[in-house]
Image (cartoon, rainbow, N blue to C red):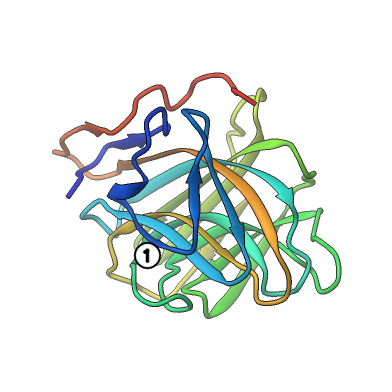
Amino acid sequence: MPTLPFADSFVTDTTGSYSKSGTWTWNSGQYITHTSTSQDFMVIDVGQSDLVEVMGSIVVTTAPTSTNDYLGIQVSANSLTAGSNRGYIICFRGSGTTPDYSNIWLLDSNVAWVTSGAFTWTIGTKYWLKIRRVGTTIYCKIWQDGNSEPSTWTITATVTPRTDTQIGFGSSTPGDTVVGNFDDLSAISLSPSTKPLNINTAVHRASRW
């Protein structure tokens, strides 16, 4: 089991190290593409649930439209059956009949939409998403690739406690089909005395798209 800090930029095909639901396709040292028509995940156990900060990048190529459709980055997740594994996830979401291009959302355990934060996003643009868990408080932020990371959090919210220790990518599309390119997954511990493990380095490299 990996320990923190953790980084995977998918320069090589490491998808076999993850627990998965659905099809996640490695694109020759570029990124992971996922086409979702159900509730899917690709997660890896890092042995820590609380005091964890996870970051990754996503390019949405076919956007979610239905209310419960999303693509995002998750922390404190597990690899149980689809629909019960999500942990806490920062994500792009549909708004009913169209994508919610004006907000980023926080989902708690695939059970409740907690809150949203104002952020304008577009299809085909690479964004960095970061989610931090400290006890029952979740912090989320998002920024466009090539821009500086914002100093403030887009979302700060209180959630129900979880003990699951997996991180990764998630999507849910019971109402339509969404497609995204996922990349640059990394996580750090906010507690002391951790050991490094990098599957692939160069997490903060320039965009390859």
Residue 71: give x, y in percent of width and height: 61, 57
Residue at 67% over, 25% down: 147
- Location of the C terminus (image quadrant): top right
* Residue 167 placement, left or right of 22: left
Residue 33 against residue 109 in the figure, above or below: above
Q: Amino acid at mark 1?
A: Ala
Residue 170 against residue 37 in the figure, above or below: above
Quadrant in which residue 145 is drawn: top right
Q: Residues within 10 Å of mark 1 (few under 14, many from 20)?
A: many
Number of marks present in the image shown: 1
The residue at which mark 1 appears reads as 77
Quadrant in which residue 126 is drawn: top right
* Residue 95 placement, left or right of 34: right
Residue at 80% over, 44% down: 122
Helix, strand or loop under label 1: strand
Residue at 13% over, 38% down: 193
Quadrant in which residue 72 is drawn: bottom right
Residue 148: give x, y in percent of width and height: 62, 25
